[in-house]
Image (cartoon, grey):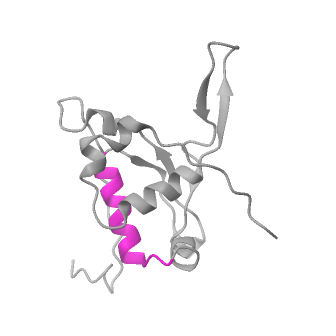
Amino acid sequence: MSEHIFPIVVMSDLIRSEAYSKLSGASHFVYQIFLSKRQLHKNGRAGKSCWIISNNGKIVFPYKEAVKKYHISNCRFARSIDDLISHGFLKITKPGNGLLNQSTLYWLDDMWRNYGTDKFKIVIRKKQISKKGFCGSKE
């Protein structure tokens, strides 16, 4: 079964933004994958229409997929998610639970536009650390 190939539209103001330039490691790559998971639909009448993300808040990108399909380690993926959240590109709308086979749901945010200003507000996700630790942490 072949995959459909669709272009990923990236706004030039995003690429030129301070928030985007400060992303580290694999975060740029992970963000591009999130963008490819958007379902875009035109909204409004002719001449006044705009594109909306119809699945925003319901975007799924499991750790298993990051590892198997994109060869991103669990630790690198977790760091990228944290990086995207802290720079205003991503929010978690519903935390998942791998033990219960529940995927995390994500929201593609545009808070990055306010990065470095008083309007910039983010919510850092709480870490779920097992007894063995996560990504080598000793907490």
Q: Position of residue 24 (x, y in %)?
A: 27, 62
Q: Which residues are magenta?
A: 71-87
Q: Position of 99 compared to 136: left or right?
A: right
Q: Is residue 138 left or right of residue 1?
A: left
Looking at this view, is 101 or 30 the one in front? Answer: 30
Is residue 74 shown above or below 28?
below
Residue 97 x/y as whole percent:
51, 67
Q: Residue at x 29, y 43 (%)?
A: 122
Specify the principal SS of the magenta part. Answer: helix
Frontmost residue, 123 versus 129: 123
Where, quadrant-wise, is the N terminus in this rendering?
A: bottom right
Task: State the image coordinates of residue 132 (x, y, percent, origin top left).
Answer: 33, 87
- Asked whether the viewer can see residue 125, the reply is no
Q: Residue furthest right?
A: 1
Q: Residue extending furthest bottom?
A: 132
Q: Which residue is located at x 21 percent, y 82 percent?
A: 138
Give the camera-side residue of 123 and 8. Answer: 8
What quarter of the picture does the C terminus occupy? Answer: bottom left
Eyeballing the image, is 85 above or below 67? above
- Residue situated in front as seen by the camera: 104 or 74: 74
All told, the count of numbered labels is: 0
Please tell me whether residue 7 is drawn above or below residue 99 in the rendered image: above
- Residue 36 picture location, percent across and down: 58, 53
Give the residue at x 41% y 48%.
Answer: 90
Instruction: Give the image quarter of residue 74.
Output: bottom left
Q: Is residue 122 left or right of residue 8?
A: left
